[in-house]
């Protein structure tokens, strides 16, 4: 009897939270760290995230629906414009913004100026998340970074974290929960992400291309999963069959991705298959093709075909 009463009285918080920041500050890494699972692509190259992706963290007390967003930058092509539009759309849907910055930021750069202007024009509370505090000789030095930003923007508070070390990520979850509206779960408790299997597979493959290639190649690449047949839907199959096409901007990039005697593509395929098996839980037959589509990032039609639809 007591138990039932206690449950009824329990306050549960749920809501949407956008992670906003310049490229490479660790927005996607914070989500993976909080969900204790690799759900979104992470890389050392800026502009890894291209779509606003919903990832769901559920605990006893709160459900946080993170909207991971592309890093804010000055767009150079239609793809960049799409990415910035994704950020703007995300901002119109959330209860709270986590403004992610890097510990050790000494001054406010042009990218942060754009972000500060955007954040001050929307009427949504902002929590400052100072990531990568593991890089500081003393964690308390994060206060210098938080002062830099709190001088320019009204902040709820500042939370120092390290996504890669898992430092203070639990504290961040509780602090976010505090600012969310009181309501029941929005998504099922066991759901980690609101995305299709095809999208997840394409992102895993793209992440490996980011990892194994340099300079302009990562930015010139898109991945489209043409076919995804899994043994649950096709019981006659013993393994899942995934056929994906890697789209590149120029013929030279095709050569780099394929590598000498196909060695680079093999490396990308092997690493991607390992993660795909882990993610989907069944053996996988992965077939990768590389196709050149000059200027695809500048073509609204091509972008739409690749799922970057305005
Ligand atoms: N030292 C350190 N590195 C981190 C931390 N969090 C993320 N990184 C690294 O920073 C790089 C960028 O991480 P991402 O999570 O992809 O950054 P992002 O903000 O999502 O980047 P975009 O999607 O490009 O906007 C990766 O190499 C991460 O391993 C951290 O707490 N400490
Ligand atoms: Mg990201």
Image (cartoon, helix red, strand yellow):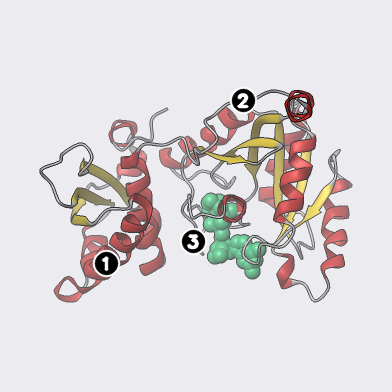
Question: Can residue 217 be spotted in the picture?
Answer: no
Q: Position of residue 230 (x, y in %)?
A: 22, 43
Q: CA distance from mark 2 to mark 3?
A: 26 Å
Whether the residue under disc 3 has CB within 8 Å of ligand 1: yes
Would you call the spot at circle 2 few (<14 residues within 10 Å), some (14-19), or many (20 or more)? some
Residue at the image position 25 percent from the left and 48 percent from the top: 294
10 Å crowding of disc 3: few (<14), some (14-19), many (20+):
some
Mark 3, secondary structure of its residue: loop
> Toward which corner of the image does residue 107 lie, by quadrant?
bottom right
In the rendering, which numbered label is found on residue 270? 1
- Disc 2 target residue: 93
Mark closer to the observer (3, 1):
1
Residue 121 drawn at (x, y percent): 74, 29
Which quadrant of the figure contains the C terminus? Answer: top left
**Residue that appears at 61% across and 56% down:** 26
- 13 or 302, which lies in front? 13
User: Quarter of the picture for ligand 1?
Assistant: bottom right
* Gap between marks 3 and 1 measured at Cα: 18 Å
N-terminal-most mark, 2 or 3: 3
Give residue 166's position: percent from left, percent from top.
66, 62
> Residue extending furthest left?
236
Q: Are the two marked residues, 1 and 2, in contact with CB atoms closer than 8 angstroms?
A: no
Q: Secondary structure at mark 1?
A: helix
Counting residues from the start of the chain, the first of labels 3 and 1 encountered is: 3
Q: Which mark is residue 291?
A: none
Q: Measuring 65% from the left and 67% from the top, which residue is drawn there?
A: 165
Work out whether mark 1 precedes mark 2 in sequence or the reverse, and give the earlier one.
2
Residue at numbered disc 3: 43
Q: Quadrant of the N terminus?
A: top right
């Amino acid at each position: 009897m007591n138990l039932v009463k206690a449950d009824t009285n329990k306050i549960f918080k749920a809501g949407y939270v956008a992670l906003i920041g310049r490229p490479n500050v660790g927005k996607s890494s914070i989500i993976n760290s909080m969900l204790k699972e690799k759900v979104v692509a992470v890389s050392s190259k800026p502009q890894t995230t291209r779509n606003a992706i919903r990832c769901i963290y559920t605990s006893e007390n709160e459900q946080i629906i993170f909207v991971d967003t592309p890093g804010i930058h000055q767009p150079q092509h239609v793809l960049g414009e799409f990415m910035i539009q994704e950020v703007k759309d995300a901002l119109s849907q959330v209860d709270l913004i986590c403004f992610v910055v890097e510990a050790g930021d000494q001054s406010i750069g042009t990218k942060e100026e754009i972000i500060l202007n955007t954040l001050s024009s929307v009427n949504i509370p902002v929590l400052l998340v100072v990531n990568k505090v593991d890089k500081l000789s003393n964690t308390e030095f994060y206060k210098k970074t938080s002062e830099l930003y709190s001088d320019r923007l009204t902040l709820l508070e500042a939370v120092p974290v390290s996504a890669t070390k898992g430092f203070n990520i639990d504290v961040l979850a509780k602090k976010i929960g505090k600012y969310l509206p009181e309501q029941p779960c929005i998504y099922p408790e066991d759901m980690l992400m609101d995305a299709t299997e095809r999208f997840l597979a394409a992102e895993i493959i793209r992440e490996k291309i980011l990892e194994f290639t340099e300079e302009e190649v990562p930015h010139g690449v898109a991945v489209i999963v043409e076919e995804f047949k899994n043994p649950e839907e096709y019981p006659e199959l013993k393994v899942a069959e995934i056929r994906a096409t890697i789209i590149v901007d120029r013929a030279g990039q095709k050569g780099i991705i394929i590598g000498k005697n196909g060695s680079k593509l093999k490396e990308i395929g092997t690493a991607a298959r390992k993660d795909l098996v882990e993610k989907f839980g069944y053996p996988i037959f992965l077939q990768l093709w590389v196709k050149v589509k000059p200027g695809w990032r500048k073509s609204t039609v091509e972008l739409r075909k690749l799922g970057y639809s305005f």
